[in-house]
Amino acid sequence: MASILSTQGIVKQFGAFRALDGVDISVERQKITLIIGPNGSGKTTLVNVITGVYKPESGKVFYMKRDGRAIDITGWPPHKIFAVGIVRTFQIPQVFQKLTVLENLLAVARGQRGEGVISALVKNWVKEEEELAKKAFSILKAVRLVDKWNTPANLLSAGEMKLLELARALMAGADLIILDEPIAGVPIDQAHEVFKIVRDINQQQAVTFLVIEHRIDIAFKYVDYVYAMASGRIISKGLPEEVANDPKVREVYIGG
Ligand SMILES: Nc1ncnc2c1ncn2[C@@H]1O[C@H](COP(=O)(O)OP(=O)(O)OP(=O)(O)O)[C@@H](O)[C@H]1O
């Protein structure tokens, strides 16, 4: 299988503190890759390096285009990394609480602030709006939010809000979606629903996912490959059952 993203020897320091100490990962195209690790192990810092928020002291981040060519995106600014198709859910401006679900998607598509949605309609861009609305509805169907299209975002449940973020990433045309704790604070039944939908989108729409999640009891059921981090290093990698049974992981992460 071809990878879509790889990091090689990433080192990131905050002063004298080494938050990432030579991190190599490879994210397979059209798979769901999970990164686990205790608090402070470097997961978010790694995502920040991948998405251009931080420049690493050393190491490289490569993004593989669909034609197989690798581009070195190390240190690129976040908007350029977004433009190649790597979208982190919260990197898109946050959900507009007062706008409806549909309006939130239309706002992403045009890269405008939410307030512009209504005025854009008035400006007679009817044809374009129709196309965007069509795309938005097909995405809402995929994330099972179609019944809520006219609901203001602030009335959604925690799980639905995560799905709206996912829908917004899809609307942005992402090839690789990075989900930072997609089920944090989401009740258990909705949490399974979120991962089932991620899985369906991964399979049906050929979107690749890189997920950080603490609730491994749920996440492990849905992902293809796992990296475990501790103290800025990768301490284990493999299939979910392999990593779950790795004594090094049990020791630092599960606690025995
Ligand atoms: N901007 C920063 N300045 C200084 N230290 C930082 C900074 N960002 C992160 N760190 C430190 O780097 C280490 C890794 O943090 P990071 O947020 O990447 O961990 P994490 O695995 O994502 O943790 P969590 O699961 O709690 O989100 C921590 O010790 C943290 O205190």
Image (spheres, rainbow, N blue to C red):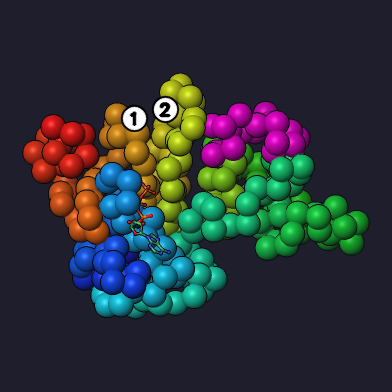
Residue 234 is left or right of residue 75, and the answer is: left
* Res 86 visible: yes
Residue at 35%, 34% in the rendered image: 215
Q: Quadrant of residue 231?
A: bottom left
Tag 2 and tag 1, C-beta contact below 8 Å: yes
Drawn side of residue 105 relative to residue 8, left or right? right
The amino acid at mark 2 is His
Q: Position of residue 161 (x, y in %)?
A: 59, 37
Q: Which residue is mark 2?
A: 192
Residue 149: percent from left, percent from top: 71, 36
Residue matched to label 1:
218
Q: Which residues are magenta?
A: 144-163
Q: 249 or 119: nearer the eye?
A: 249
Outermost residue to the front? 16
Q: Earlier in the sequence, mark 2 or mark 1?
A: 2
**Whether residue 3 can be seen here:** no
**Which of the two residues, 41 or 211, is positioned nearer the viewer here?**
41
